[in-house]
Image: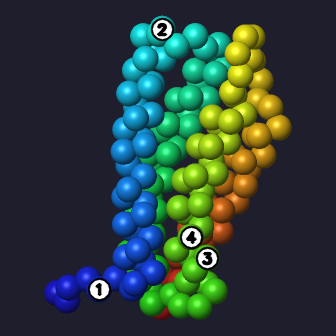
Amino acid sequence: MDALHLTDASRILAGVVLLTVPTIEIGGWFMTRIVRGLVPMTPFQKAFARAGHAHAGVLVILSLVCLLYADAAGLTGAVGWIARLGVPASAILLPGGFFASSAGRGDVDRPNGMFALVWAGAAALAIGVVSVGIGLLTA
């Protein structure tokens, strides 16, 4: 079996993505404070905090996998960049949308206008994985 050779773009993006893991760990620590009742939040805010944290972790892992697959498919040019950046962008936008749209003090019980980031993240995710998937199928 040949050794895996990452393109420079995937290698650099993977390094950046891996450097985000400590922020997810800090989020996990913060989640432990929320579930112990040390951070006052409404049930809605707690649910969105859980959703944001879970999406961040899963999408970071999927980002790393998609970088490997983009290289395996030999994706280059604009499609290569879309394939490599779509999922990492979703790993920022989607969780950010959950966190930002539930921010605030008091009786916050529904998302604010920042929920649009969730939809932007979902679009980036779909575009990224479809690009990688098609790339793999046509390689």
Q: Residues within 10 Å of mark 1 (few under 14, many from 20)?
A: few
Helix or strand or loop: what does disc 3 sit on? helix
Tell whether label 1 touches label 3 (CB within 8 Å): no
- Marks 3 and 1 sit apart, C-alpha to C-alpha, by 20 Å
Q: What amino acid does circle 4 point to?
A: Leu
Residue under the image location 71 percent in, 22 percent down: 104
Q: Is residue 52 above or below residue 40?
A: below
From the viewer's perspective, tell me whether residue 125 is left or right of residue 58: right
Determine which residue is flagged by label 1. 5
Q: Disc 1 versus disc 4: distance between alpha carbons? A: 19 Å
Residue 66 visible in the shown view: yes
Q: Which residue is mark 3?
A: 82
Image quadrant holding the N terminus, namely bottom left
Q: Position of residue 75 (x, y in %)?
A: 51, 87
- Residue 35 percent location from the top left of the image: 45, 15
Q: Amino acid at mark 3?
A: Ile
Are the residues flagged by discs 3 and 4 in contact, CB closer than 8 Å? yes
Q: Secondary structure at mark 1?
A: loop
Q: Earlier in the sequence, mark 1 or mark 4?
A: 1
Give the structural element (helix, strand or loop) at label 2. Answer: loop
> In the depicted view, which residue is nearer to us: 3 or 93?
93
Callout 3 crowding tier (Cα within 10 Å): few <14, some 14–19, many ≥20: many
Query: Which circle's residue, 2 or 1, is located before the other in the chain?
Result: 1
Asked if residue 61 shows in the view, the reply is no
Which residue lies under the disc numbered 4? 85
Q: Tag on residue 42?
A: none
Q: Earlier in the sequence, mark 2 or mark 3?
A: 2
Please give the name of the residue rendered at 47% of the width and 10% of the height, measured from the top-left corner: 38
Query: Compared with residue 43, is residue 27 higher up or lower down, i.e. above or below?
Result: below
For the residues labelled 2 and 1, the Cα–Cα distance comes to 47 Å
User: In what element is the residue under mark 4?
Assistant: helix
Q: Dot 2 surroundings within 10 Å: few (below 14), some, or many (20 or more)?
A: few
